[in-house]
Image: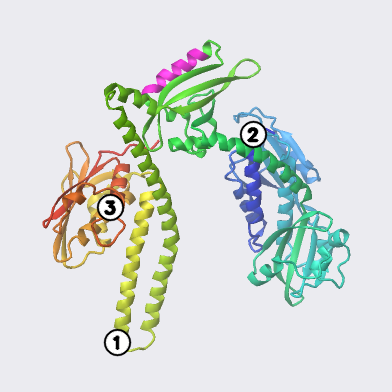
Amino acid sequence: MSTSDCVELKSLLAIRERLFDMPIDTSKGELNFYEELCRKFSGSAETAVSVYPSDRGAIKPLASSVPFDLLEYFEETAASDLLQRSLDGGLVKATASLASAHSGKRVFVLCCIRAFKKPSAVLVLSSPSDFEYLAEYTKSISQYASIAISLIRTAHLEQTLLDTIPAYVYIKDQSFNIVYYNRHFSETFGSPENKKCYQALKGASKQCPSCPSLQALSGGETVRNEWISRRGKAYLSIHRKIQFQGSEHLLTIGIDVTDLKVLEAQLTDALSELSELEFIINKSPAVTFLWRNEEGWPVEYVTENTSVFGYSPKDFMLGGIKFTEIVHPEDIARISSEVGAHSLKGEDAFEQSYRIITKDCRTRWVRDYTWVRRDNSGKITHYQGILLDITDEVLAKEVLKEYTLNLEKIVLERTKALREAERMAAIGETALMVGHDLRNPLQVIVNLAYSMRESVRSSGIDEAERARIEKSLDTLVNQTDYMNKIVSDLTDYSRPVEPKVERIDLTDFLEKLVGDAKIPRRIRVSIAVEEGAGEIRSDPSMLRRALTNLITNAVQAMPGEGCLSIAARPTREGGTAITVSDTGIGIPPEIKARLFQPFLTGKPKGMGLGLSVVSRFVELLGGEVSCESEVGKGSSFTIGLPPAHPKPI
């Protein structure tokens, strides 16, 4: 099995696990189940799944993981024949026969989904690779779907119907006595008459540890588990509480998954070897690409460590970003010409150096070691490249020319910058975890405060005591809001984000912003928008967050009466400047010099992230933020926005 096949099968097994964990809602019917089943496969990069009806009408899927039509790959007669052969009871495998617009070979496996031995639908799984476990995998999904459809159709159980299920079925009471079983159960485990479930299935003398039946009975939800019989067989069981003979019982349906478990063990060994190789590759500085020899060089494969440039494999796969879109515009013509020249000479390998644009719009130099792939006719089909980031090397050469006498200082500065970058990365990861863990408890506190306030208002206690309690609750909510702001600052400073630019009516935007802000009545507020600055294009969420932090800081800087003013004006370069000014206490010079550094604050409370969030968001918007302040007179912060924000790559 090839590396790409192992990767795809690993993904498919993960999908299967999520599918088996999917609750089966018998009230929503079969079509809903098919749609949910296909939706589980929608994230697969290579494999498509669809479900076709069992009737002989038009060949049209009931549900699909992606837009899909068998008629794009087969003549109508051939497609109809494949579906019919599957409905007749066979596991059908075929390769696309039409030379359609779809490039590359695709393999199709069709397996009938049956309920009570009657065809319900046809499961169609399509993959570009015909790997060893594809048929067995499709069969396991079909068997699981058969069980699910059977469960949906068993609202009223009848023994003659249940005996046709290709799985064992039994019902037990709350004392674990088996009160009903189908023929498959007795053929597999023997007669369970006068036995409890753990005696009949496992020959045990007491209830199983972590019994799934108890979980299903107490929670009322469908519970899934896997277990091993005395004969070493592996089974997948589904348990659900039902009403049977006038009282609550537990229905259990199970299938033999021994063969699949053997295949999983073999796959685990193969994936273990693959994971070691992936670990080595992804920990190395070399990013590997596989490009098709087509316009734009579409990416067929890229290693996970493309994250060093800010991208993920998903950004390039499934018709996403083409490779030429990340090449520096000034270098595209040159490297295209070089690739063409090397290819015409019949060379199998060559080397290039050029610049690429990272996802956060930075420029990096790379050295590209490229190998050529050809088909049997000698036609070039792909290029495989290993990219090494040589930005430091390029910059070092330039720096060495200028600072040959100052090498030691440069090394020390680079080392310090690297350590600082590592420190900030660790802080960012910690901030995300802290923010995530705090937000839910804070919301619980707010909800409890609201509930307590309503209880106090309806309790009938005297007015003075109620006012005292409500004042305490107001203090609790205000402090919770303050803690929530800290969580928001932590999250905003740490999470990856891209601007979403849209048109903003600045006058309306600022008025709503001030209206939503908690500004005490002792502070006078003024808003002024000059002509030419009334409409801008920016990310409203980022701009709102940045301005809210500035307004909050301004209010906190004025413990007594004061004036808060917000003014917008057009700039000489065609952009917009928004200034937030206060008449507060001002900022000391020693603090102002490091004002936008994270975790720096001159306040008795706070994390010191508010202005760091402002700086980060304004930078993402392509702008700059500056400050003017005088102790005892107040401060002014100005956000300078460009004429238009560049489109993210």
For marks 2 and 3, give the CA distance: 49 Å
Residue that mark 2 sits on: 3
Task: Give the position of the N terminus as an image quadrant.
Answer: top right
Disc on res. 600: 3
Q: Is residue 335 left or right of residue 585?
A: right
Q: Position of residue 312 (x, y in %)?
A: 49, 39
For marks 1 and 3, give the CA distance: 44 Å
- For label 3, count other residues whose C-alpha is less than 10 Å away and answer few (under 14), some (14-19) or many (20+): some
Task: Give the position of the C terminus as an image quadrant.
Answer: top left
Q: Magenta region, mostly helix, strand or loop?
A: helix
Who comes first in sequence, dot 1 or dot 3?
1
Q: Residue at x 35, y 26 (%)?
A: 396
Q: Position of residue 294 (x, y in %)?
A: 52, 24
Q: Position of residue 469 (x, y in %)?
A: 33, 81
Residue that mark 1 sits on: 463
206 in relation to 610, above or below: below
